Image (cartoon, coloured by chain):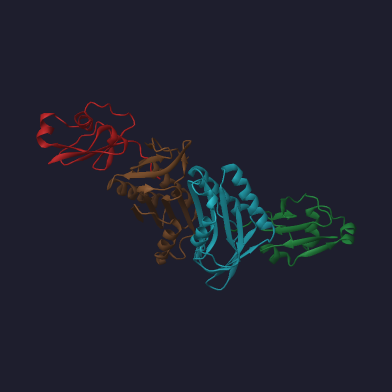
Chain colours: A brown, B cyan, C green, D red
Amino acid sequence: MTIIIDSKAFDPWKVLDDYQQNMPHLEGQYGATAVFVGTMRDFNEGDNVSEMFLEHYPGMTERHLENICKLATGEYQLLESLVVHRVGAIKPNEPIVLVAVWTAHRKQAFEACREIMEDLKSKAPFWKKEQLKDGQDRWVKKNTNGY
Amino acid sequence: MTIIIDSKAFDPWKVLDDYQQNMPHLEGQYGATAVFVGTMRDFNEGDNVSEMFLEHYPGMTERHLENICKLATGEYQLLESLVVHRVGAIKPNEPIVLVAVWTAHRKQAFEACREIMEDLKSKAPFWKKEQLKDGQDRWVKKNTNGY
Amino acid sequence: MSIEVKFFASMRDLIGDDCEIGSETLKEHTISTVDDIWDHCARGKTRPENVLIAVNMNYVDGKALVKEGDEVAFFPPVTGG
Amino acid sequence: MSIEVKFFASMRDLIGDDCEIGSETLKEHTISTVDDIWDHCARGKTRPENVLIAVNMNYVDGKALVKEGDEVAFFPPVTGG
């Protein structure tokens, strides 16, 4: 189980490649890997967005992400899990979040990945401020429901 | 929309990296990517499995995978989709299948990825023959339900 | 023109190689449905209940009609992914 | 010992910087719940209905008791991911 909060841009496929190479003890055990990547779009609620700033609550954010992954690990028998989340200034087309889980069977992988993502969206203290193309900025007021 | 059936081993993260680099027209449009990777385990139904052989029905398999992706594209407004499936001899810890979809919003990505995977498991003509550690081989009789 | 009949995976182990049914045979044996094809090619073997059938790569059931030029396939439940 | 009060995102724009409530002030103003903390630090601002509250990084509601040494945070609905 690994939680990374980072202000640097990351390549989700490179991160997954590296992470999986450090799982030799799980070779032959996992039959299913489910991954979600959230990427910054250049439009939201009908407006063009040129940049975004992601604030978080240092300490609380890490703790809640850890709790979310621990709960999912028990409920879905996760063999491994990885969450990476950007903070700070983000440009369109850059990944914001990566959630990956490894399980024996696919049902658990699909459900755990989605549940971690939804819990993150509703409980992990992150806040987005969008900078619009016209120069204005605004806090995103609420998340969309993912179910 | 791309369907690949290949007898060579593939690295899912490398494949995704390459594929996404050829999607410049979609930059800033997709907010969600959902990925599933099915990997060969070294045990199944209580037995140690040393190798697997994957047979398919050339022509029909491609066609049904295309149909599955086309249906999902309409139902879930997929911006892009990719399915890669191994055939032939496969060793434990090698990826068997990769399903990836790109959408504006996460709900569609999660649901489409899972639905494509379930449809593939129930409709795409592939058959697994397992070679057990004790030298015997056997056809896998049926798939587990993923819901 | 003839009908090409294919067997895959455990169905091939059960029945044997693909079989081709020529025009003459089709007429002589009044083969008009998938069920007729099985009876002709399966050499007395009982068809497993869960067998899947495709005509020209589309799923059909045993009552489906076949005609010259068709490709018919019998196979067990699929187990890919 | 004191209570540290933090505001995040739009809540910081609304209220201003973090505030620290010392022992003396806590006693003088009989501050014992999160609601009391808001009234003391928010300078008359109405608390938005959907505000989230954490004490020592755990979610609580306005009736939650606070004590010296606690860290209290007010923030809007989270919007990460």
Res B147 seen here: no
The N terminus of chain A is located in which quarter? Answer: bottom left
Position of residue A129 measured from the top left corner of the image (x, y, whole percent): 37, 40
Position of residue B113 measured from the top left corner of the image (x, y, whole percent): 54, 49
User: Nearest the camera: C65 or B19?
Assistant: B19
Res A47 seen here: yes
Q: Is residue A128 left or right of residue B128?
A: left
Q: Is residue D77 above or below residue D39?
A: below
User: Nearest the camera: A73 or C47?
Assistant: A73
Total label count? 0
Q: Is residue C10 above or below residue D49?
A: below
Residue at 78% across, 64% down: C19
Residue A131, quarter of picture: top left
Residue at 42% across, 52% down: A98
User: Nearest the camera: A121 or C63?
Assistant: A121
Residue at 51% across, 61% down: B12
Q: Is residue A83 left or right of residue D3?
A: right
Residue at 58% across, 71% down: B136
Position of residue C54 measured from the top left corner of the image (x, y, whole percent): 72, 54
Outermost residue on the front side: it is A134
Position of residue C65 measured from the top left corner of the image (x, y, whole percent): 80, 50
